[in-house]
Amino acid sequence: MRKLTPIILGIVLLMSTTLVYGQYRYVKGHAASIYGDIKYGPGFKHFDYVNPDAPKGGMVRLASIGTFDSLNPFILKGIPAAGMGLVFDTLTVQSDDEPFTEYGLLAETIEIPGDRSWVKYTLRREARWHDGTPVTPEDVIFSFKTLVERGHPFYRSYYTDVEDVVKVGPREVKFIFKKGSNPELPLIVGQLPVFSKAYYRKHPFDKTSLDPPLGSGPYRVVDVKPGRSITYERVKDYWGKDIPVNRGRYNFDRIRYEYYRDETVALEAFKAGEYDFRLEHIAKVWATAYKGPNFDRGYIIKEELPNENPTGMQAFVFNTRREIFKDRRVRWALNYCFDFEWMNKTLFYNAYTRTKSYFSNSELASRGLPGPDELKLLEPFRDKLPPEVFTKEYNPPKTDGSGNIRQNLRKALSLLREAGWVLKEGKLVNAKTGKQFKFEILLVSPSMERVAMPFVKNLEKIGIKAEVRVVDSSQYVNRLNNYDFDMTSVVWPQSLSPGNEQRDYWSSKAADTPGTRNLAGIKDPVVDALIEKIIQAPYRKSLIAACRALDRVLLWGHYVIPHWHIRVYRIAYWNRFSRPKIKPKYALGFLDTWWIDPEKDRIIQSVRR
């Protein structure tokens, strides 16, 4: 799906006819942009961040943690194999050096009227499935309706403002939108993965399967070892290999994902040469484990690459469907038991910055007190919101980093007493029922235990019994899909262009739908109203105000205990690759733009033997 990224000075298409309707334009062309300008004109040859002459060849090996039991990443059932997005093309593709501009992939042209009531795509004549048959408007219509009716619940929410999709020509398909809905929809619909209608007449879409599906993308599945590995092969006669958006991309002949039971085993396998590339997320591991002769000799490269991506929210999330977490004061109290400053110093080598916004590291993040544009959105709901939304800037509780958080714990107990919890004989119990405050922290990564355990010990000091449970990836996914947890660690990614996905994250409807990202179980009409303001924002200025207003409401709802963020990619790789001189602003670009350098590869292969 889309790389969640900026909205709405006006969707503009470059080329041909241009008629102005209010703030928007009617144009027809090769690309669509959120900001109103398009970097690459109609005759562009390739993106700037690729090497159009990059050599093709070789195999790259990557790692994935856990297991898989399905090659269908578009349904709720099963655990899909890594990399399946390589098999399916979409109508458009987003450039990685613009905030949110999409260029035709399966679509040759994009047409949008000034009132944003529809979008029409004209498919390329040369677009083909891997069996040589053409991609048709019927395939696009089938794909959309299948995802909405039988796909993951996310798609139902994501495309809820699409009223209909119809064939309007031999190669033309038109998406019709609900009135007054979402001016970002023309770009959102362009991200639609397209499936073969003929293939799925013979194969059930809504069941897990390990049969390689028919695709139209740059790679096909050639080998599957269930739960152990999956291998993709570059399609030599791929229909789109020479179109401008693909030149210089997809340079590896084969891509194999090997599965490991946990990160520790996977890291040791990497250092032993079992696979080629790692993206590291753990500060301690980055600081201490990436050492040895192969690093010293330059056989393995370790580096940090800055990026300009918004960092979103990583946090411990409360499942407010649980009775003990329904009271906002309880959730705020537990925030006082989380000692980020001590963790950052002791566990993370001071590598991180504390997160205090759901839109961190972007202009969409709330700051200070609400401005006039935010107040216009918030004032109608004043009687339904915590007073702090209007009177205080949100900041999570702080400590001095010494590990002594006695003052914070006193504050936590004060809030808990207000919420009906009392300390008796060293146990925090409900004043009415006498039951002890107990809950479970569900984790899938053993590395998160070192974060959870100090938090658990602080909770013990105020009489709360919290247990950490680490489960395998299958059980974890199933439990999250069914909201069968008390607390867990989660990341909500954000972009410079928030939109429909906010419904999946926070809306009341999503709270009651299995498999959404509304893990907190938020059911708040104010949140629902602000989500719609984001989706329908007609200008960039109004989008910023709506995001900041939503940010304040979510933060002061205390649905999470915020963690931290970093603005670099921490990568390590065996030195057998080369990459373009220009790095994309908003992506790492490894699978997209790197290639195997024959001379470097010869040296590394001799070392690995």
Image (cartoon, helix red, strand yellow):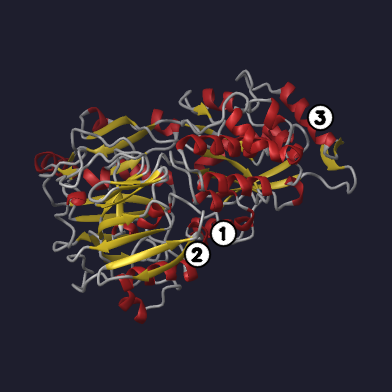
Q: In the image, 238: left or right of 90?
A: left
Most foreground residue, 143 or 225: 143
Most foreground residue, 421 or 32: 32
Return the disc, 1 or 2, that comes first in the chain's sequence. Answer: 2
Find numbered disc 3 in the image and state the secondary structure of the residue it sits on: helix
Q: Is residue 19 visible?
A: yes
Examine the rendered structure and indicate whether residue 403 appears above or below residue 384: above
- In space, the residues marked 3 and 2 are separated at their CA atoms by 42 Å
Residue at 27 percent of width and 41 percent of height: 38
Examine the rendered structure and indicate whether residue 308 appears above or below residue 258: above
Return the disc, 1 or 3, that comes first in the chain's sequence. Answer: 3
Q: Amino acid at mark 1?
A: Asn
Q: Is residue 196 visible?
A: no
Q: Are marks 1 and 3 in contact (CB under 8 Å)?
A: no
Which residue matches tag 2? 76
| Residue 487, percent from left and from top | 64, 47
Which residue matches tag 1? 481
- In space, the residues marked 1 and 3 are separated at their CA atoms by 34 Å
Q: How many marks?
A: 3
Q: Amino acid at mark 2?
A: Leu
Q: In the image, 464: left or right of 189?
A: right
Residue at 46 percent of width and 39 percent of height: 539
Return the disc, 3 or 2, that comes first in the chain's sequence. Answer: 2
Would you call the spot at circle 3 few (<14 residues within 10 Å), some (14-19), or many (20 or more)?
A: some
Q: Amino acid at mark 3?
A: Ser
Which residue matches tag 3? 414
| Residue 227, percent from left and from top | 39, 62
Q: Are marks 1 and 2 in contact (CB under 8 Å)?
A: yes
